[in-house]
Amino acid sequence: MLDYASLNALAAVVREGSFERAARALHVTPSAVSQRIRLLEERVGCALVVRGQPCTATETGRRMCQHMDRVLLLEQELHGALPALAADTDVRVALPVAVNADSLATWFAPAVARYAAQAPVLMDIAVDDQDHTFEWLRNGRVLAAVTGTARAATGCSTQPLGAMRYVATASPAFIAQHFLAGVGAGSFARAPALVFNTKDELQSRWVHRLCHRHVELPRHYLPSSHAFVEATLAGMGWGMNPRVMVQEHLATGALVELVPETPLDVPLHWQQTRAASSLLEGLTRQVRAAAAQALIPS
């Protein structure tokens, strides 16, 4: 049987990023944390932590941290059912979740805030492209994710949330400078596009659908949903913005659709591990309710 005190020390080091901060969180000495992890590494026969700034988990260490996350969730649920077992009713458990940046910037953050205000959890939210959050779940780095992948990861259930609608927008001045002769493959090859990061394919997908061929886009990289909108308003480039974030600017004319009535709808799904607790189910209810209000039917 695993030594859960040692496993908890491992999870604390990975979560806090150092042995010293983990020791403070666990109210023990750094040497005690180091000893517990050394004993655990001897037990499993391999390294579990990469010592560095910050400390990170090895592949085996990550899987053991994932196991600890699930154990703590189930333990917290048991404490709720049997309060006499709880030595400290103020203990909160980490709940790792992955989500795409645009969802976090619009409808997801309020849902998580409502949930965390009532539940004994500490949210650990990772941000990645909606086409890549699935990997976080598949690799066991999170227990739930908002993802663009409908196929369920092994050991997970999946539920459709709806679709986020994107529109290709730019400032009137940018359109006058770069698209005065029309919107087409030639103008797209010259006009700078705003792209979130190297994983962001929304702009390329929309252009391919419009032009029926690949166009190599000149790109500004800007990894912030709100800064993305501000940069579009300032005329830095054109980009695919969530309609909910730019609808007021479209109404005032501060932004204009490059080609009206050509939205790009991105279906989103909620995936969670099946070996879940009522705490994770509570988050699922909040996420689904918020998505039903904010997203359009897939």
Image (tube, grey):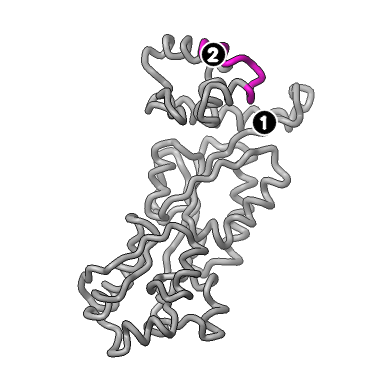
Q: Residue at position x 58%, y 61% from top?
A: 107
Q: Position of residue 152 (x, y in %)?
A: 41, 47
Residue at position x 56%, y 41% from top? 124
Residue 32 forms part of the magenta stretch:
yes
Extreme residue toward the right, this view? 84
**Pointer 2: residues within 10 angstroms few (<14), some, or many (20+)?**
few
- Tell me: residue 290, above or below residue 43: below
Quadrant housing residue 139: top left
- What secondary structure do most residues of the magenta stretch adopt? helix
Q: For this rendering, which residue is in front, 290 or 11?
A: 11
Give the numbered dot on residue 3: 2
The residue at which mark 1 appears reads as 76
Please tell me in which quadrant of the rendered image residue 104 appears: bottom right
Q: Position of residue 164 (x, y in %)?
A: 48, 66
Where residue 7 appears, as percent x and y from the top left, is: 53, 20
Report helix, strand or loop for mark 2. Answer: loop
User: Vertically, is 30 above or below 275?
Assistant: above
Q: Secondary structure at mark 1?
A: helix
Which amino acid type is marked by label 1? Answer: Gln
Q: Which mark is residue 212?
A: none
Q: Which residues are magenta?
A: 24-35
Point 62% across, 47% down: residue? 283
Label 2 and label 1: CA atoms lie apart by 18 Å
Question: In the shown orientation, is residue 61 left or right of residue 124?
Answer: left
Quadrant assignment, res 26: top right
Please say whether residue 124 is visible from this viewpoint: yes
The extreme bottom residue here reads: 181
Residue 26 located within the stretch drawn in magenta: yes
Residue 82 percent location from the top left of the image: 75, 27
Q: Kindly identify the amino acid type of the residue bearing the numbered disc 2.
A: Asp
| Residue 7 in the figure: left or right of residue 130 | right
Could you tell me which residue is drawn at 39 percent across and 26 percent down? 58
